[in-house]
Image (tube, grey):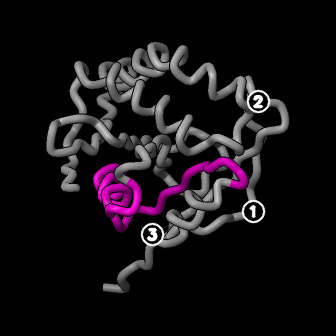
Amino acid sequence: MPFRIREARLSDLDAAARVRAACWRESFTGLVPDEVLANADAWAPRVAEAWASSMLERGASYWLAVDEHGQIVGVAHADAAFEPDAPAPLELKTLYLLDRAKGSGVAAALVHRAIGDEVPAYLWVIEGNERAIGFYERIGFRRDGAVRAIRPGWPGGRQVRMVRRPAVDPD
């Protein structure tokens, strides 16, 4: 199935946030408590509002993977690192892909559009999400040992940090 990557418009964000909710249900069943997954759709309007705010206030870009019918199947977003102990200047904050698009190469294309190939970057991924961790490792990210609790809404949930430090050309 062919996919293409394009930059999101404000008018895309509601649909993209609903895709995010669907991705949560597809990807996190068994990893995330059922009550958290049950709220994914309810959170979609607030997610879309936050994304719109970041676009309007800071010029943030969101990248969409769309199928041949123009339907959104994935979303990615990166932003400047705001954490005081950030291991890189750029954070991949969002990468969600519907199951029907996984394995197609579109996730790597989304990451490329969001952060490029040469910029050091990091991300947080749910501990135990081995498929995602394996994907990130294939595209150059490595766990750096940092772990944080997921709050609010998921007591006991944790994320692990992964960092990509591309090789520097000596020239």
For the residue labelled by badge 1, is the local secondary structure a helix, a strand or a loop?
A: strand
Q: Nearer the viewer, mark 1 or mark 3?
A: 3
Identify the residue shown where x is 70% and y is 44%. Answer: 31
Residue 63 falls in which quadrant of the image? Answer: top left
Quarter placement of the C terminus:
bottom left
What amino acid is labelled 3 in the image?
Ile
Q: Residues within 10 Å of mark 2 (few under 14, many from 20)?
A: few
Residue 25 falls in which quadrant of the image? Answer: top right
What amino acid is labelled 2 in the image?
Trp
Q: Residue 170: x percent and y percent?
A: 37, 85
22 lies above or below 2: above
Mark 1 and mark 2 residues within 8 Å of each other at the beta carbon = no
The answer to whether residue 70 is seen in the rendering is: yes
Identify the residue shown where x is 72% and y is 52%. Answer: 127
**Residue marked by disc 2:** 154
147 lies above or below 170: above
Q: Per the image, is 61 magenta?
A: no
Identify the residue shown where x is 33% and y is 33%. Answer: 60
Q: Which residues are magenta?
A: 102-128
Q: How many marks?
A: 3
Q: Nearer the viewer, mark 1 or mark 2?
A: 2
Earlier sequence position, callout 1 versus callout 3:
3
What amino acid is labelled 1 in the image?
Gly
Q: Residue 50: x percent and y percent?
A: 45, 19
> Marks 1/3: CA distance?
18 Å
> Marks 2/3: CA distance?
28 Å
**Residue marked by disc 1:** 145
Q: Residue 10: x percent and y percent?
A: 25, 21
* Outermost right residue: 156
In the shown orientation, is residue 154 left or right of residue 98? Answer: right
